Image (cartoon, rainbow, N blue to C red):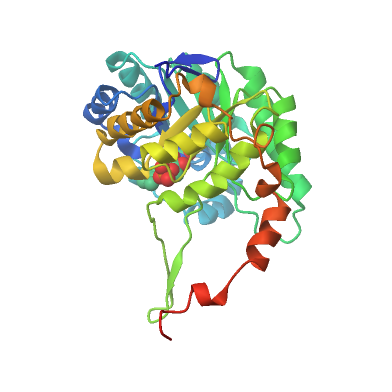
């Protein structure tokens, strides 16, 4: 059975890898991920705010702006709260490269076009095999048109892509008014991959204390559905390779991700809950499913349920929405005998 796949131009023995998370801070965990068969190691992000804060600290001439900037930064974690500062991040790339044989994908996370993006080159020089650029941004400003947000991201991506030799993937949220169009613009910039999707960490509130409570809930398989829809829509229509992130917990989840078009399948919550070995379990369940259903290769399975190849493409679109709503039966929810 041939599980091999190509992601970001890298030939990998299979699609399964840990997604960006703090697991990579511990070299022992990194080794355990490789032992569990990870086809690549994705590092957690180095954040724009971390880099800018450090650059600001060293540029005395910018004191004039430091007041307002320092106030804005007071909402962010203190430098000591990040496990790895910018230089330590580069050092961690070197260390991880020295202990594993699989490709190492580093991650930069930010929202503005600026000097901090120089770290993309430093990451390349430190030996990363590819870079994930995470453009996590919550558009809360009423004056900011969607087109401005999109343009800024495209400018950032262009700057990073033209400055690097290694491949880059862009990790996106699903919240764009016309995601297909925006992705076609990214594709025109020749990004090597798209990572679908960021999860937004949604704060709760404490009504007694009148406080906002930061929460981090790990995912479950229900979150995969949004990824499946967009993988299916994009598969075969963009040149960039596609990675699924969000809601992959079982081999069957991985089968669905590959069938809708994923070249790579990233897993985080399931590994944080069950440990690095769970990556091997997912791969085993995946291969058992392939055997049972007589698939010979990942290539054969990939995209077989995409919009282009699906026997029922309308079911991914508005037709299904109408059918589901019109077909709803109240009795199906009512408890028996009531
Ligand atoms: C504790 C934690 C830390 C994370 N750190 C990062 C990060 O630094 N950069 C990033 O792009 N994504 C980060 N993520 C998001 C994951 O890479 C992944 O996209 C998300 O958890 C959805 O996948 P899952 O359902 O398998 O957990 C983090 C997730 C968790 C739970």
Residue 176 is situated, as x and y percent measured from the top left of the image, at 69, 48
Q: Which quadrant of the rendered structure holds the N terminus?
A: top left
Residue 44 is situated, as x and y percent measured from the top left of the image, at 41, 35
Q: Tell me if 175 is positioned left or right of 32 in this view.
A: right
Residue at x 70% of width, y 36% of height? 183
Residue at x 50% of width, y 52% of height? 73
Figure quadrant of residue 144: bottom right
Q: Which residue is at the far left?
A: 28
Residue at x 37% of width, y 25% of height? 291
Q: Is residue 240 above or below residue 178?
A: above
Disc tally is 0
**Which residue is more in the foreground, 88 or 106?**
106
**Which residue is more in the foreground, 137 or 312?**
312
Q: Is residue 118 above or below residue 320?
A: above
Q: Which residue is at the far bottom?
A: 338
Q: Tell me if 203 is positioned left or right of 178 in this view.
A: left
Q: Tell me if 106 is positioned left or right of 141 in this view.
A: left
Q: Which quadrant of the rendered structure holds the C terminus?
A: bottom left
**Which residue is more in the foreground, 248 or 200?**
248
**Which of the four quarters of the rendered structure image does ligand 1 lie in?**
top left
Residue 246 is situated, as x and y percent measured from the top left of the image, at 46, 44
**Which residue is more in the foreground, 163 or 243?**
243
Figure quadrant of residue 274: top left
Res 57 seen here: no
């Amino acid at each position: 059975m041939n599980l091999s796949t190509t992601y970001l131009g890298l030939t990998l023995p299979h699609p399964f890898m840990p997604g960006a998370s703090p697991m990579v801070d511990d070299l022992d965990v990194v080794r355990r991920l490789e032992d569990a068969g990870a086809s690549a190691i994705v590092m957690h992000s180095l954040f724009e705010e971390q880099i800018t804060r450090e650059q600001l600290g060293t540029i005395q001439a910018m004191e004039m702006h430091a007041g307002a900037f320092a106030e804005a930064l007071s909402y962010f974690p203190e430098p000591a709260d990040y496990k790895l500062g910018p230089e330590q991040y580069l050092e961690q790339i070197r260390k991880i490269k020295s202990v594993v044989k699989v490709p190492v994908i580093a991650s930069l996370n930010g929202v503005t076009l600026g000097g901090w993006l120089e770290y993309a080159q430093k990451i390349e020089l430190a030996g990363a095999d590819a870079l994930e650029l995470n453009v996590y941004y919550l558009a809360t400003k009423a004056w900011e048109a969607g087109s401005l947000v999109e343009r800024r991201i495209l400018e950032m991506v262009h700057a990073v892509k033209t400055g690097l030799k290694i491949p880059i993937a862009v990790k996106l949220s699903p919240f764009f008014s016309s995601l297909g169009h925006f992705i076609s613009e990214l594709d025109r910039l020749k990004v090597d991959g798209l990572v679908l999707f960021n999860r937004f960490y949604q704060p709760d509130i404490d009504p007694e204390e009148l406080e906002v409570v930061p929460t981090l809930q790990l995912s479950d398989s229900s979150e995969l559905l949004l990824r499946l829809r967009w993988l299916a829509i994009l598969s075969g229509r963009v040149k960039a390779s596609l990675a699924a992130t969000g809601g992959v917990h079982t081999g069957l989840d991985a089968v669905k991700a590959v069938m809708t078009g994923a070249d790579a399948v990233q897993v985080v919550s399931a590994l944080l809950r069950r440990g690095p070995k769970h990556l091997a379990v997912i791969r085993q369940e995946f291969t058992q499913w392939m055997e049972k259903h007589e698939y010979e290769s990942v290539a054969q399975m990939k995209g077989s349920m995409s919009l282009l190849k699906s026997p029922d493409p309308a079911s991914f679109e508005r037709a299904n929405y109408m059918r589901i709503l019109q077909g709803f039966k109240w009795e199906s929810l009512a408890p028996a005998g009531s």
